[in-house]
Amino acid sequence: DELAGYVARSLLLRAGVGLQRQYIYTWNGKAPMGLQGNDSGTAWNVVAGWLLGNTPSPCTESGKVYTCSIGSSLAVWDTSQTCGSKGCSTSNYPYNTKYTHQTDLTGTKTKLSGKTVPIGYEPILLTEN
């Protein structure tokens, strides 16, 4: 979880400042550092999909919560949260009601309900549909 979160955050932060290329030297290396065929590689592919065809804005920080606008969507995570052997901790993020769905780093899209969404070390993407 931690490596997947790091990979996703790295890609989002760099894209937000206009970095057009990022090279991964351990794509097909052995686990846990190689990305291909594990959760961190999936996270890379999912976040790359979020970015393709969209114009990301620089990420902003409010306390320990980072947000990155990607077209009409919003990537968000909380740097105060951690990941361990039993998963990752979360906090509640009050989202704008224009967002109706969230997508996690596995590519799973779920409908939002209520006034807050749990966010953690791993970014999620909030979308309008």
Image: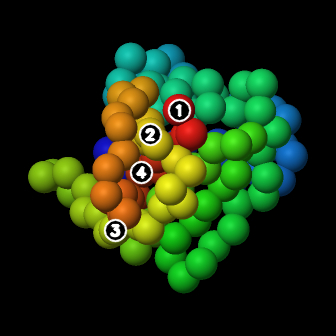
* Residue identifier under label 3: 92
Residue that badge 2 annotates: 101
> Which is more foreground, mark 3 or mark 1?
1
Q: Amino acid at mark 4?
A: Glu
Is residue 96 visible in the rendered image? The answer is yes
What secondary structure is found at the residue carrying circle 2?
Answer: strand
Residue bearing the label numbered 4: 122
* Residue visible at 47% across and 33% down in the picture: 43
Which one is in front, 72 or 106?
72
Which residue is painted at 25% across and 63% down in the image?
A: 89
Image quarter in which the N terminus is found: top left
Badge 1 amino acid: Asn
How far is mark 3 from mark 2, CA to CA? 15 Å
Residue shown at the point (54%, 24%) measured from the top left: 45
Residue 95 bears which disc, if any?
A: none
| Residue at the spot of label 1 | 129
Structural crowding at the residue carrying mark 3, measured as other residues with C-alpha within 10 Å and reported as few (<14), some (14–19) or many (≥20): few
CA–CA distance in space, label 1 to label 4: 21 Å
Q: CA distance from mark 3 to mark 1?
A: 21 Å
